[in-house]
Image (cartoon, coloured by chain):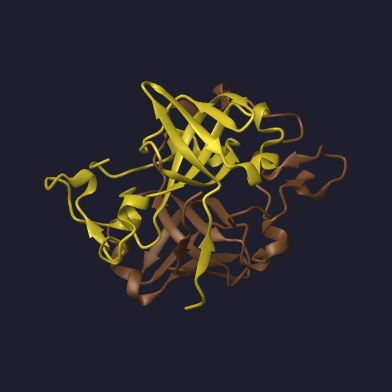
Chain colours: A brown, B yellow
Amino acid sequence: MGSSFRMEPVGVVRLEGEKAHIEIYPPYIDALLGLEDFSHLMVFWWFHQNDTPEKRATLRVHPRKDPANPLRGVFATHAPMRPNLVALSFCRNLSIVKSRIFIDGIDAFDGTPVIDIKPYIPVEDLAPEGVSVPDWV
Amino acid sequence: MGSSFRMEPVGVVRLEGEKAHIEIYPPYIDALLGLEDFSHLMVFWWFHQNDTPEKRATLRVHPRKDPANPLRGVFATHAPMRPNLVALSFCRNLSIVKSRIFIDGIDAFDGTPVIDIKPYIPVEDLAPEGVSVPDWV
């Protein structure tokens, strides 16, 4: 089943009141060049509070912790418990000042480790009218 | 700057001619329950061929390896060289048979390790008319 992979945080989520930004760590600041040209970003982060063997072994959940939702495999949900604790948020890119990327908000905690940033480039196939999801969503 | 994180592959990309599927490894098959209800998936994989210290230390590239494109930080591109080698593909979910997720295609190699699967749920803010990208895209 192959070897394991190692990741180092490249930054951290910072929340202050209603303001949110990503603080990129000094060794990675050069990787930001040109990011200001994109209106939207994909922020990849790590559900670090769930980085335990037990939570990573959780394969089925009731989505949104609501027992009224059907039991589902974690790959069929965005649940914060999954074998690899990768999280993804789509954010509006408000401004970039040195090491800080100011965004419109993010569903993460202050102090959450960030593992990657990519620009959001529209995907043709994903127009909402062509996408189907189950009722519980 | 925090500790590092460890990931195990949960599956592998399989390409045969024009057909593509994700083979999920036996310990993770239970995590697929309900995935068949979604038309589109986000497949997270690892640029494993670039998992060297040199490539992970590459912070700026000419996008698409085209010297005519401006030098850009890797966080402003989808380049396969970046500090954490996380890749994301949006795929159409054609069918799921036991451990296999058949998809319409993926920009990865046969044998590429898969690290996570999430359903694609439309994001309201991402209508193409509201998203801006630079000319080189």
Q: Position of residue B7 (x, y in %)?
A: 53, 59
- The answer to whether residue A36 is visible is no
- The answer to whether residue B3 is visible is yes
Residue B122 against residue B7 in the figure, above or below? above
B100 or B117: which is nearer to us? B100
Image check: A110 left or right of A73? Answer: left
Q: In which quadrant of the rendered view does residue A69 lie? A: top right
Residue B120 against residue A89 in the figure, above or below? above
| Residue for point 52% across, 64% down | B6
Quadrant of the drawing holding the C terminus of chain B: top left
Q: In which quadrant of the rendered view does residue B97 lie? A: top right
Q: Position of residue A122 (x, y in %)?
A: 41, 36
Extreme residue in the right direction:
A68
Image check: B12 left or right of A77? Answer: left
B133 or B112: which is nearer to us? B112
| Residue for point 57% across, 30% down | B100
Q: In which quadrant of the rendered view does residue A105 lie? A: bottom right
A121 or B133: which is nearer to us? A121
